[in-house]
Every structure is written in C-alpha cells, then in structure tokens.
Image: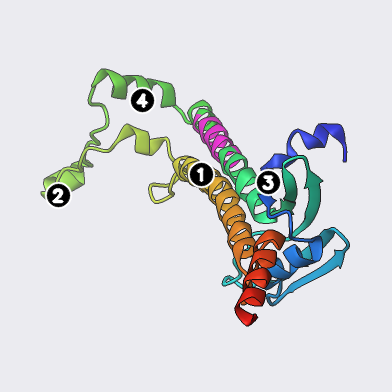
Amino acid sequence: MNLGLRYIDWIWHVRGSMIIPSRLSADAAFDRLDALFREPGTTYVRDGETLVFQKKNQASQDKMAVFDSGVVRVESDPQGTRLSYDLVSKTLLLCFLAPALFFGFGEFFKYTSSHHTVALVDHTPNAKSMVANLKSGKDDTIQLLNPIDNFMGAPKPEKKDASAKLSPSKEKKKISSTTSYVFAGLFAFLYVIGRILEQYLVHRNFRKNISKNNGKQVMDSGLATRRIASYKMLLK
C-alpha cells in the first residue's frame, strides 16, 4: 500500500485486534466467526490463518452490512494468540466526503448569489441611488397616480420595496446556501458517530462469537486430565 495513502485510509478502514484463547487454532476461531460471514451477499475464503471476505448487496439485517470487504487473521503474539482484522467500508468514505461536497455547494451558491446581485446593480438604471435611499430611509418608492386615475378616485399604490426593483422577478426565489451547510454538518456528525460506533460494534461481535462454545464444552488440558483421573477413582 502507498505510504501516503496509509496515513488517510483510516477514514474508510476499521482496524483492530484482540487476544483470544491460545488453545484455539485458526480453524477453530474462524468456525466461531462463521455465522458473521454466512449472510446473503457475502462470500469468503479461508486460507490457513487468513480469512478474506467480500460483500455485495448486503442486507440491512447483516451485522457487518456497513463493510464491503476485509481481512481477518489469527496470529501468534507474545501474549498468546491474537485475532486481527482490517475492514473496508465505502459507506464511511461517502459519509466523510459528503460534508465537503455540500460545503462546496454552499460556497458556490453564495458566490453566484453575490455576483448576481452586483450584476443587477450595475445594469439597473438608478439602482445605486435606490439602494442608497433605501438604506438612508428616504421614501422615494411611492408611485404617483395618473391624473385620470386620480380624478376617477383610484386608490394610491402601495409603497414598493426598492430591493424588489433590483430583482428581475418578485416570485423568483433566491438560492440559499444555508441548506447546503446544514447537510454538510449533518453528514459530518453521521460520519463521526458512525466511525466510532462501527469500530465498537464489530469488535464486540468478534469478541462475542469467539467466546461462544458452539454447543461444545471447552476445557483446558489440565482440567480434562483431572476429570479423567476422578472418573478412574470412581470406577475402582
């Protein structure tokens, strides 16, 4: 793996390890984990002390549905036997990239909106004086009635907002960047929570399955020897 990529692949990789009973061989350990990989859409290959799996169209009920592939190994360790794993999740990668994408949309909308306003001011007659009068509080937006309309008793027109004159259409909605920023924050939150939660859940699932006896009583050799000796004494 590229050394530079190694520093950032933690974004979509979940790694960890745990000490397992030394009496367990690699085959026995993988047998206990077998239930996690016998899920629809999951294929895996066991080769000695290594298990490689891939998932495609995994069901939501799959306890490891968030992961698309990975490697699980059983290795010797000074403290005993160690189970280590390196799992890959495209979902985590997308959740990490989504905030940057929506933040970019927000900045783009803000940029285009500001330039659109400047363009309207530059191309609208008396736009600068209208904006200045609006800011200073001067009321120059009352339209005078036509003499004929005044004679007929037509009501005076209401005061118009000067800022509305700068817009090509009253009904045209402004593009807001706020929504993009909200989505950026939401996906950033989801990534942080998901990254921590998935690390914890997969470690717990591995630990839970390794601790199972699969319906068989497991005992160390010393305990087994003592029980055999006790049975022999009872038979005498």
* Earlier-in-chain disc, 1 versus 4: 4
Amino acid found under the numbered disc labelled 2: Ala
Distance from disc 4 to disc 3, alpha carbons, whole Å, reads: 65 Å
Q: Residue furthest front?
A: 236
Q: Is residue 14 left or right of residue 164?
A: right
Amino acid found under the numbered disc labelled 3: Gly
Amino acid found under the numbered disc labelled 1: Ser
Residue with the mark numbered 1: 180
Q: Secondary structure at mark 4?
A: helix
Question: Which disc is residue 154 wearing?
Answer: 2
Question: Which disc is residue 16 wearing?
Answer: 3
In percent of width and height, residue 26 lies at 80, 61
Q: Which numbered disc, 4 or 3, marks the residue closer to the eye?
A: 3
Q: Nearer the viewer, residue 76 or 226?
A: 226
Q: 194 above or below 166?
A: below
Callouts 2 and 4 close, C-beta under 8 Å: no
Residue 126 seen by the camera: no
Q: Which numbered disc, 1 or 4, marks the residue closer to the eye?
A: 1
Q: Which numbered disc, 2 or 1, marks the residue closer to the eye?
A: 1
Callouts 3 and 1 close, C-beta under 8 Å: no
Q: Secondary structure at mark 1?
A: helix
Quarter of the N terminus within the rendering: top right
Distance from disc 1 to disc 4, alpha carbons, whole Å, reads: 32 Å
* Residue at horizontal 69 percent and vertical 68 percent from the top: 32
Quarter of the C terminus within the rendering: bottom right
Q: 139 above or below 69?
A: above
* Residue at horizontal 51 percent and vertical 44 percent from the top: 180
Residue with the mark numbered 4: 130
What's the magenta region?
104-117
